[in-house]
Every structure is written in structure tokens, then in C-alpha cells.
Image: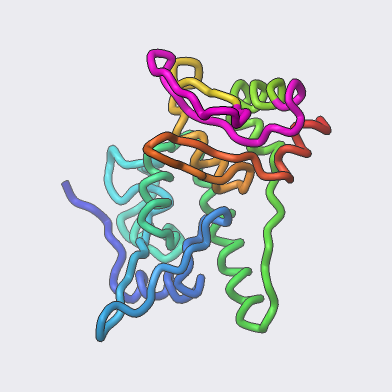
Amino acid sequence: MRRDDFSQPTIQLLAKRVAHRCSNPGCRKPTSGPGGASAINLGVAAHITAAAPGGARFDPSLSAAERADFENGIWLCQQCSRLVDADESTHEISTLREWKAFAEAAAFIELRGYDVVRARNFADLERKMPELVAEMRADLRQQRFTREFVVLSKAWSYSSGRTPHFSYFFEDHPELLGKLQICVHYRAIYDVKYNQVDRFNFSEDFAEYLLDA
């Protein structure tokens, strides 16, 4: 099947306009650096609307030239490029265009010596996964000083000794790990995986949001 891929000049332009950083505002990882005597690139020139039918967010109204145009591209790290295509309902065209605009503005500002921090919108996160956030809020209201939680199947057994924690189950929340990865991008939680157990901690900002609402 024919793909309307980007040219090399377009790929280079997408990377350079965001300073070779992932355009996901919750990630912004550097995507290039030294590798041996040369340099390595871990970035991807991703299509906002797919390069071919069947891809994420494919728009049949676009011409081949429009699909391969700079305006239809966004620079991402490899992990985020897979995430946006795997979770198409969360990563809509408007969302990716917003990411791109923010990343270019951030690069422009940083080039002039300023730091950029984007405030996380936890209300937006809650709209994406209301059932999970509601359960987290109920748990924190019962145990206000607990921050750790684990991700499990109900068929498993788990003991963390005397460390207080919450538990969230795959059976209760479809695509749970994917949702938690988005929470990480929003800086609502951070990964503290240990001994092959998926464990996370709530950030204080997100805990305050849940307790104050």
C-alpha cells in the first residue's frame, strides 16, 4: 500500500523546529545525542493524519502532497509515537496540533534563555478517564497520606509488607496501563516499579487536586 511519507528535508525541519525534543508536553525527552563517534536519533517524524488508509486519524480528504507536508507532521520520541497511534481516541488531531504548537513555542522561548513549564490540567485528565480518577479520589479521601499504589489482576496475590498502598485492577479498568502512562505524562503520578510489580506514586500536585475537588 502506498504511503505518503515525509521527505528528508521535512523530517529534518520537524526535528529542528522543536530542538530535537519530543513534542508531547508531558514528555519532551531529547531525541538525539552522542553515540560512539557519531550521533544517534531516537525521534520520529509522525503523521498527524495517517500516511495511508487504515492508519490512525486517516483523512481521505487530504491529497498525497498534503499528507506528506510539514503541516501534517509532528516530532515525537519513539515511545510517544507508538502511544498516539495506539490510543487514537485520546490523541485526536486537535490534540496533536496543540502539542506541536506548544513544542515550537517552547523551543523558541528556550532558545532565548528562558525555562518552559506547562501547567498540567488535571481536570482534562479526569475527563479522559473519569472512572479511574473517581476511584483514586475515593481512596485518597479514606487514606489522605497514602501515595503509593500497585496495579494487579484480581487473580494475583501481593503483599508490600507494612507499606500502605492502594490497588487498582486490570479487570476494573480496561487499558489500565495505557491510562496510567497518560497519567505519567500529565505528571499526576510517577513510576516506582520494583521487583516486576507495577507500582506508582501520586504526585503531591495531583493528590491535592483529588482531595480539594
Image quarter of residue 111: bottom right
Image quarter of residue 143: top right
Q: Nearer the viewer, residue 60 or 35?
A: 35
Q: Nearer the viewer, residue 179 or 104?
A: 179
Asked which colour scheme the image uses, the reply is rainbow
Q: Residue furthest bottom?
A: 37
Q: In the image, what residue occupies the spot 32% across and 70% down? A: 41
Our reading of the magenta stretch's main secondary structure is loop
Relative to 146, does residue 35 appear above or below in the rendering? below
Q: In the image, what residue occupies the spot 76% across and 30% down? A: 144
Q: Is residue 129 left or right of residue 88?
A: right
Q: Nearer the viewer, residue 71 or 75?
A: 75
Q: In the image, what residue occupies the spot 62% across and 69% down? A: 106
Relative to 30, does residue 182 appear above or below in the rendering? above
Q: Position of residue 136 (x, y in %)?
A: 65, 26
Q: Position of residue 139 (x, y in %)?
A: 68, 22
Q: Is residue 211 left or right of residue 167?
A: right
Q: Is residue 163 shown in magenta?
A: yes
Q: Is residue 111 shown in magenta?
A: no
For the record, the magenta segment spans: 140-165
Relative to 40, does residue 96 appear above or below in the rendering? above
Q: Residue furthest left?
A: 1
Relative to 181, does residue 32 appear above or below in the rendering? below
Question: Where's the C terminus, which quadrant?
Answer: top right
Q: Is residue 148 left or right of residue 20?
A: right
Image quarter of residue 14: bottom left
Q: Residue furthest top?
A: 155
Q: In the image, what residue occupies the spot 83% across and 33% down? A: 212
Q: Position of residue 120 (x, y in %)?
A: 68, 49
